[in-house]
Amino acid sequence: MTEKLDVVALIGSLRRGSYTRQFVHALIKLAEPTRLRIEIVEIGGLPLYNQDDEEHPPAPWVEFRSRVQRANAVLFATPEYNRTIPGGLKNAIDVGSRPYGKSVWQGKPAAVISTSPGAMGAFGANHCLRQSLVFLDMPALQQPEAYIGGVDKLVNAAGEITIPATREFCEKILRSFESWVRLTGDSGARGL
Ligand code: FNR
């Protein structure tokens, strides 16, 4: 396998100044020398999931499903809202999971990174998300677990992770994820 692995990153926060988004941009930079090519796929424009619309699915749903379907793997990076994941991310998950029997998540390797300015690193959101991944049959990277606390102070103006130990930890996540995608990857996806 010489081709880079195509990883879509979904960001749980929709706000412009999102620390989670800054963190994902820093990860994308760190991933440049690796075999992972990470691309953010926006979820903020997805209409709320409504089963009634499946007969004529909105164009953003169709485009989103098709983009995820083409990917080798999914990186979820999310803050915590009220001890669970933000509604926008849950909506994206629901959109990708239907119509019944055609879920784009099926068998797709995943990694979960949760973020918070607080010390607990959004542990609650991380594990709520993992609960859905079990049902969606997405093999999720187990270790290292990534609960990123103090995310508001991690990325500098140049878009780099400032704390060396955190940077090394992120490099370790990327290495582990690459191995995980190769090990568990969807045989129908490109590059495997
Ligand atoms: C929060 N925040 C929050 N933080 C946390 O650690 N646990 C939580 O349960 C919550 N709950 C919560 C609910 C709502 C509605 C908001 C708007 C915020 C704080 C949150 O971590 C903080 O706003 C982050 O900055 C959000 O991530 P982004 O947008 O910076 O990526």
Image (spheres, rainbow, N blue to C red):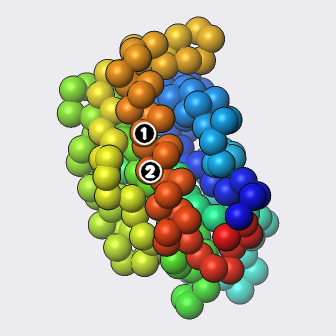
Residue closer to the observer: 190 or 14: 190
Residue located beneath label 1 in the image? 172
Which picture quadrant has residue 15? top right
Give above or below for 174 relative to 18: below
Residue 97 position within the rendered picture, expressed as x and y whole percent measured from the top left: 53, 75
Residue at screen point 44% across, 25% down: 167
Q: Is 146 on the left or on the right of 59, as rendered?
A: left
Residue closer to the observer: 184 or 67: 184
What is the three-letter code of the residue carrying label 1?
Answer: Lys
| Quadrant position of the N terminus in the picture | bottom right
Q: Is 60 on the left or on the right of 115, as rendered?
A: right
Residue 166 position within the rendered picture, expressed as x and y whole percent measured from the top left: 38, 25
Disc 2 element: helix
What is the three-letter code of the residue carrying label 2?
Answer: Ser
| Quadrant position of the C terminus in the picture | bottom right
Give above or below for 153 relative to 89: above
Mark 2, ligand 1, within 8 Å: the answer is no
Q: Is residue 50 visible?
A: no
Tags 2 and 1 in contact by the CB under 8 Å rule?
A: yes
Task: Categorize mark 1 by other alpha carbons within 10 Å: few (<14), some (14-19), many (20+).
Answer: some
Q: State the mark number for residue 176.
A: 2
Residue 69 position within the rendered picture, expressed as x and y whole percent measured from the top left: 68, 71
Residue closer to the observer: 179 or 152: 179
Residue at screen point 32% across, 47% down: 144
Q: Residue furthest bottom?
A: 101
